[in-house]
């Protein structure tokens, strides 16, 4: 009726005011974190490199704990995270048959489980809104992993993604406001990443939350988000505070499906101090032999596979083994939030030839510090249902929240 205010318009106006007031802080935050991310790409992050940040002392969040040493800026993260929890809203497009490739995840197990968990978690969380006008971002809920599970070819996946996005563009007004810059999708399968290339604006403008943040598929660090590849459910409980049991210097076992893995196996498989296996450990040796080795190892080697990423990184973190990342051009998950130098060893692939010397040169006290910090970050690399504060889902949402105020077409 005339003369009465529109409640949706009023709420929208208030949200816009909050967005404008936070724009400067969020812009500076993402610029700082993007700078940190690019520094990590262009300069090798060796174990003895120190990043200088002066963090003011703050009252610690009771759930976050006094873990300021594992973040680039504990204060910025604490304040922005609290604001995200209060205000961030995401609209999920309701279209698509849930029995095919939309809305529902394929499954919540295996090395691509992160995609399924996100689909489930976003529906369970307080971030979802049914009122599109209140949304800061729009989620395109198409599951490439589910397509792959149903045997859909790469060519057909590309067509399905394009047709679905085209239908959303025609049916709703939201995409055209920013040409998709306030839209995002999630996929953990590397084939799913390539399947989006049929929609150029989806690659150029939209936020791609992917498990394979490799630059040969157009990953843009300041726009896209690296989704951690987490092999859940874990076979054994989390490790940690067990340094005396870790008598093996380094461990890796896996398939030689990349150049760096071939070199790693060829150079070190007969070494007496590094436990390097040229294949996955045969189950006939006993139950969970592979996982139990993580408990007894100081440094777990994580070479990139067919893509730069590997679920072995999050396996190492879960079992309390300091990950050694051997993968060039990998934008590590939550790299603009977490200081990976504090809980991992990051090397260039060419360092594989000096691997044992590098690990042996790390002082014991530095290894102890790395190990303790691995335990601290475990909560960030764990999916839960329903999601809990600071878990993998909330960390991804925080990454999205950082981007929604500053990424515009």
Image (cartoon, rainbow, N blue to C red):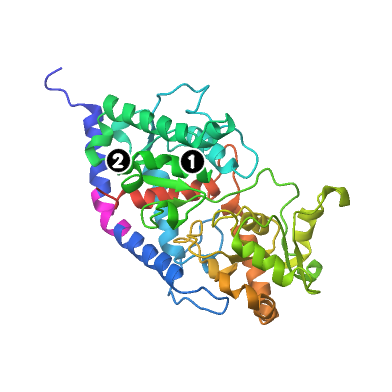
Query: Does 114 sit above or below residue 263?
Result: above
Q: Is residue 3 visible?
A: yes
Q: How far apart, in angstroms, are the residues tagged by discs 2 and 1?
A: 18 Å
Q: Is residue 6 left or right of residue 81?
A: left
Q: Where residue 265 sits: x, y (%)? A: 71, 65
Q: Is residue 56 visible?
A: no
Query: Does 73 sit above or below residue 383?
Result: below
Q: Is residue 25 magenta?
A: yes
* Quadrant (top left, top right, bottom left, bottom right) of the N terminus: top left
Q: Is residue 282 magenta?
A: no
Identify the mark nearer the N-term, 2 or 1. Answer: 2
Q: Where residue 117 sits: x, y (%)? A: 56, 39
Determine the main secondary structure of the stretch shown in magenta.
helix
Q: Residue furthest top?
A: 1
As drawn, the label of residue 252 is: none
* Observer-nearest of 237 and 174: 174
Specify start and end residues of the magenta stretch as a single range: 20-26
Residue located 59% across and 42% down the image: 112
* Mark 2 Cα-neighbour bin, 10 Å: few <14, some 14–19, many ≥20: many
As drawn, the label of residue 192 is: 1
Count of labels in the image: 2
Q: Is residue 260 left or right of residue 405?
A: right
Residue located 76% across and 49% down the image: 236
> Which structural element holds mark 1?
helix
* Mark 1 Cα-neighbour bin, 10 Å: few <14, some 14–19, many ≥20: many
Give the labeled residue for mark 2: 180
Q: Where residue 302 sits: x, y (%)? A: 63, 62
Q: Where residue 323 sits: x, y (%)? A: 64, 64
């Amino acid at each position: 009726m005339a003369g009465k205010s529109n409640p949706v318009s009023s709420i929208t106006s208030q949200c816009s005011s909050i967005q404008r007031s936070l724009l400067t802080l969020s812009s500076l935050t993402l610029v700082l974190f993007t700078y940190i991310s690019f520094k990590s790409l262009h300069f090798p992050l060796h174990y003895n490199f120190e990043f200088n940040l002066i963090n003011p002392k703050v009252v610690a969040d009771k759930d976050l704990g006094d873990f300021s040493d594992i973040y680039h800026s504990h204060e910025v993260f604490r304040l922005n995270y609290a604001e995200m929890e209060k205000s961030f809203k995401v609209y999920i497009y309701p279209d698509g048959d849930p029995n095919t490739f939309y809305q529902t995840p394929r499954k919540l197990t295996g090395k691509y489980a992160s995609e399924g968990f996100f689909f489930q978690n976003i529906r369970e969380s307080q971030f979802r809104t049914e009122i599109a006008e209140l949304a800061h971002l729009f989620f395109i809920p198409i599951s490439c992993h589910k397509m792959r599970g149903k045997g859909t070819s790469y060519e057909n996946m590309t067509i399905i993604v394009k047709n679905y996005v085209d239908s959303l563009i025609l049916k709703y007004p939201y995409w055209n406001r920013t040409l998709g810059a306030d839209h995002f999708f999630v996929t953990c399968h590397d084939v799913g990443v390539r399947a989006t290339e049929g929609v150029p604006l989806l690659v150029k403008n939209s936020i791609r939350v992917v498990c394979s943040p490799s630059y040969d598929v157009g990953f843009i660090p300041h726009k896209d988000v690296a989704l951690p590849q987490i092999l859940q459910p874990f076979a054994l409980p989390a490790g940690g505070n067990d340094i005396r049991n870790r008598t093996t210097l380094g461990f890796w076992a896996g398939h030689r499906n990349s150049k760096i893995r071939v070199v790693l196996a060829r150079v070190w498989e007969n070494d007496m101090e590094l436990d390097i296996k040229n294949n996955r450990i045969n189950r006939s040796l006993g139950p969970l032999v592979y996982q139990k080795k993580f408990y007894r190892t100081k440094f777990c080697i994580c070479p990139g596979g067919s893509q730069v990423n590997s679920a072995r990184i999050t396996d190492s973190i879960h079992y309390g083994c300091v990950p050694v990342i051997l993968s060039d051009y990998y934008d590590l998950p939550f790299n603009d939030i977490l200081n990976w130098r504090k809980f991992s060893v990051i090397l260039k692939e060419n360092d594989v030839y000096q691997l044992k010397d590098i690990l042996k040169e790390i002082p014991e006290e530095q290894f102890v510090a790395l190990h303790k910090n691995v335990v601290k970050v475990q909560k960030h690399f764990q999916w839960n249902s329903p999601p809990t504060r600071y878990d993998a889902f909330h960390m991804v949402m925080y990454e999205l929240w950082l981007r929604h105020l500053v990424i515009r077409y």
